[in-house]
Amino acid sequence: MRRISLALLIALFLPALAAGASKDTKLTLVAYSTPKDAYGQLISSFQKTGAGNGVTFSQSYGASGEQSRAVAAGLDADIVAFSLEPDITSLVQKKLVAKSWNKDKFHGMVTRSVVVFIVRDGNPKKIKTWNDLLKPGVQVITPNPFTSGGARWNVMAAYGGALRSGKTPKQAVDYLGKMWKHVVSQPTSAREGLVQFLAGRGDVFLAYENEAIFAQKKGQPVQFVIPKATILIENPIAVTSTSKHKTEANAFVKFLRTASAQKIFAQNGYRPVVASAAKGFNFPTRPQLFTIKYVGGWAKVEKKFFDPNTGVMAKIQGSGGG
Amino acid sequence: MAARAAALPSPKARQSPWPGLAVGLSTLYLSVIVLLPLAALSWRAHGWNAITSAQAVSSLKLTLGVSVLVALVNAVAGTMIAWTLVRDRFVGQGFVNALVDLPFALPTIVAGLTLLALYGPKSPAGINVAFTRWAILLALLFVTLPFVVRTVQPVLLELDTEMEDAAASLGAGRLATFRRVILPNILPAILSGVALAFARAVGEFGSVVLISGNLPFKTEVVSVYVFGRIESGDAGGAAAASVVILTISFVVLLAIGGFRRWVTRHDR
């Protein structure tokens, strides 16, 4: 009996081994979870192009910070796509991504979005600006910036929004503290926050435009307001320096920045990094839009706001705000 | 079960054929599965402010407090359910019996989702406890339900009803019979279940995270706090906080174990 099953095993595995030895290249994409649907569509269109012919993918999705740490700890990856730049910077420090990763005309970015207010049907509390969040009784949901790297976009949007309204950096930090007193729930991720909001908690949920559009496409009753001053979210992508298939991996990243690929991102709610791909989509521009550079750049911001012991947000959380 | 083993002839009467080998294998297995990971965790722990900050202390107090409460409620409710399942006969008993294990089979995040829908702002029952400490209690009661039931049930099954008849014939009331005949027999099992429920409650993450709101100083449990430390790149602090939780849990488990030994001292 044992001999038969062994023979059976060999018979089953031989073809698999043979297939593995063929010219097919397998790329591993390690990404944060939000663009999962988009990447599914993008991979199949890439495989229809000349460069993508015969390239297969293994895909891993999860929270951006966790994915980054997994790669740092040795998870094989040819391409990494994260929610925010610091998750790639930490891989650069470990020499897993080349220093020059953002030295292209897209600065290493592949998609964009903006921070928006998801509000209740008809916006009963008339929330339009960052100051409206301070109105008495307004309840805010935002993921915890210490458990969700993506939530750091929300904090920086609020801080920059306060700066844009004429506040000094110190006053803007004060604003953050006051705003945080209106936070009634700090889910660990954006999707969790949406579940809580749809379950009836809070008046406003700080989220990304692409998430709001995604929810609408899934038929969820979501309305959102884009504040006049908000942050332009930019999501990075990079080929790892440990990749054994750099040619194919670079070809895929190049493909992602073509107009046709960017259109697929746009259909999934992301603002494209190639201007021409935005045609036919409704991505309203805002007069006071700013980037992470406006609030100091990620390196400075990470230290000043998100150091778990000394950061501004650690102090706001520690003072019992919220 | 402990009570059963204690009721049997002394375990010394039957030793395993290769005592040394059995002990060796058990130790090896325990080392690989439990001790080594714990040692590695302690090794990585550094950064005391991850443990001494007001936020950390508050989340730890909340977690321990709620876990003790959960253990106590389970001791009573779990024994009651086990009693009903063993001693009473009713329609759908097999169904209810299977239902008890359901919280184990359910992914905990699904439990959180279900509880949020049932007892959240849009509760069909009109009960909204979501985003309060009650929600944490509820979620933990849900995931720890099977422990006491499943430890007490087999002991109750084995319990000789003749003892109760004898007690009754000697003039003991129902309450006295329960307190002086039944309870001493099932108490070790209850304590085993209580210890398991407590340990599980301290470490629980999935079912709590969605329904509690995770507000520091209000509804943030220690597992969520540790998760935050990891996500902020402070793995050392996360490990340090974990070591503190482990130590406290271990002391509590030892104490419960000690109490159980004291309860069963006459059987040995």
Image (spheres, coloured by chain):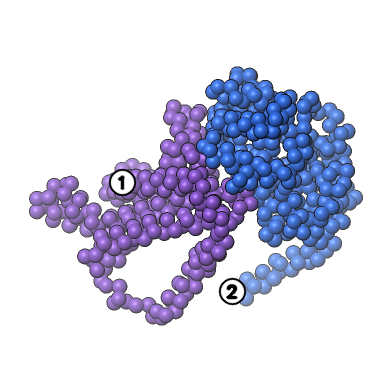
Chain colours: A blue, B purple
Residue at x 31% of width, y 54% of height: B190
- The local secondary structure at tag 1 comes to helix
> What's the residue at 83%, 48% (across, down)?
A102
Farthest-out residue, left: B170
- Is the residue B29 above or below the residue B65 in the image? below
Residue A248's spot in the image, x, y percent?
A: 85, 55
The front one of B144 and A21 is B144
Judge whether residue B59 can be spotted in this image. Answer: no
Q: Residue at x 13, y 47 (%)?
A: B173
Amino acid at the residue labelled 1: Val
**Camera-side mark, 2 or 1:** 1
SS at mark 2? loop
Q: Report crowding for label 2: few under 14, some 14 to 19, many 20 or more residues within 10 A (C-alpha).
A: few
Q: Chain of mark 2?
A: A
Seen as rendered, the residue at the extreme right is A50
Q: Residue at x 25, y 60 (%)?
A: B263
Q: Identify the amino acid type marked 2.
A: Met
Name the chain letter of the residue that bears numbered label 1. Answer: B
In the rendered image, which quarter contains the N terminus of chain B?
bottom left
Left or right relative to A170: residue B219? left
In-image side of B28 versus A264 (left or right): left
User: Looking at the image, which is closer to me, A90 or A321?
Assistant: A321
Bin the neighbour count of mark 1 within 10 Å (Cα to Cα): few under 14, some 14-19, many 20 and up: some
Quarter of the image with the C terminus of chain B in it: bottom left
Circle count: 2
Quarter where residue A245 is shown:
bottom right
Which residue is denoted by mark 2 in the rendering?
Answer: A1
Q: Which mark is residue B216?
A: none
Q: Quadrant of residue A268?
A: top right
**Mark 2 vs mark 1, CA separation in Å:** 52 Å
Pointer 1 residue = B76
